Amino acid sequence: MSATASRASGARERRSNPLRALLEAHRSLAAILGMAVVTAALPLLAAMPPLNGFNSQGVWVDSFANAGVFVLLALGLNIVVGLAGLLDLGYAAFFAIGAYTYAFGASPFSGNDFPFWIMLLIGAIVAATFGLLLGAPTLRLRGDYLAIVTLGFGEIVPTVFLNADKYTKGTNGISGVYQPSLAGYNFTFTDPWPYYLTMAVILTLAILAIYRLQDSRVGRAWMAIREDELAAASNGVNPVSTKLLAFALGASTAGLAGAFYSAKLTFVSPDQFGFTVSFTVLAMVVLGGMGNIWGVGVGAFLLFIIQSVLLKQLNPFFASFGLTGIDFLQYQYLLYGLALVAMMLLRPEGLFPSVRRRRELHAAEELPEEPVAAEAAEGSTP
């Protein structure tokens, strides 16, 4: 089908489906409606079989709020890896910086009690500053070398927090971090709904901002650098400022998630931000579909629920069938690893890949037969 015919077909389909045309023309509206539907549907699904057989609705809502933290992390890493093509293996460092920033600003340990809503922004700004500090010396690096440098940064930050006992309480961590409050209502452990709704609002705002960035000149510059940095620079893209902006925005999203996470748990310690977190978030981005905002969000949510909730219910599930002699919890990471391997073999572009990413990975399959090889085969025929 030619490009003209394709456009004509798309125009006819949009005229026949005005709702779809409206949502395509107004992505912000589509994002808001989508998040509203998801936010309302998840608690309802949690109260229905089979999910209510695993946990109560309140426990599910609390898990959904925790999953939202990792969805936010995945959205931020998608800016760095999915859009700009910069492999970051130390992303948990910015998560830790945001969490400790909030702990320093609102805890008995520091003696400060700044409002949660202000500390969210401060945590994002502090993490973005460290993102710039990390990005500045790595501008000349790419590929494996960039991955090693970011991996080193990810190991350095938790180690600094671990050994700075005077300022971070070291291995004991900072406990008693103050929980948020809004209009006189104090958030508590017994009521997960405020955290769930707050995270839904934060995710909606983050998705709106990332959509705007993706479709802007900056977003196109990120994708140009990802595909061919030399060609992008030759066409007027400034690699220095573009890369630094990607690092800063990705780090700010992680800082925002860290501030929320520490306020929800009321506790931060260095062992919460190891390499496992960076690897898990990267797996969420890859499995969800790099470059696709909704794909990354759905992939992160599903992976967190499977890994942190459903796999922990293996023993009760199999006990209902009479299998009680095996501790299936010991095999949860084995199952998790097998699922990752199978996913990369069967669908390397992810569950919900972007159109551009799918074309990149399957470009060889769409190429026609090489004319030189065909001519050579014809010439060899007697």
Image (cartoon, rainbow, N blue to C red):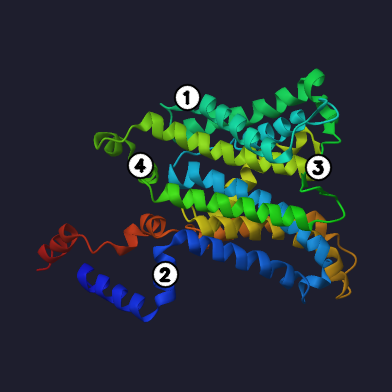
Q: Nearer the viewer, residue 346 or 91?
A: 91
Disc marking residue 179: 3
| Crowd tier of the residue under label 2, counting other residues whose Cα lies within 10 Å: few below 14, some 14–19, many 20 or above | few
Q: Quadrant of residue 265?
A: top right
Q: Nearer the viewer, mark 1 or mark 3?
A: 3
Q: Which residue is mark 4?
A: 221
Q: Which residue is mark 2?
A: 22
Lower sequence index among marks 4 and 2: 2
Q: Nearer the viewer, residue 107 or 237?
A: 107
Distance from label 4 to label 1 (Cα)?
18 Å
Q: Nearer the viewer, mark 2 or mark 1?
A: 2
| Crowd tier of the residue under label 3, counting other residues whose Cα lies within 10 Å: few below 14, some 14–19, many 20 or above | some
**Residue at position x 71%, y 59% from top?**
305
Left or right of 119 in this view: 20: left
Tag 4–tag 3 contact (CB < 8 Å): no
Secondary structure at numbered mark 2: helix
Looking at the image, residue 327 lies above or below residue 274: below
Q: Quadrant of residue 271?
A: top right
Q: Position of residue 277 (x, y in %)?
A: 67, 42
Q: Nearer the viewer, mark 4 or mark 3?
A: 3
Q: Position of residue 218 (x, y in %)?
A: 38, 42
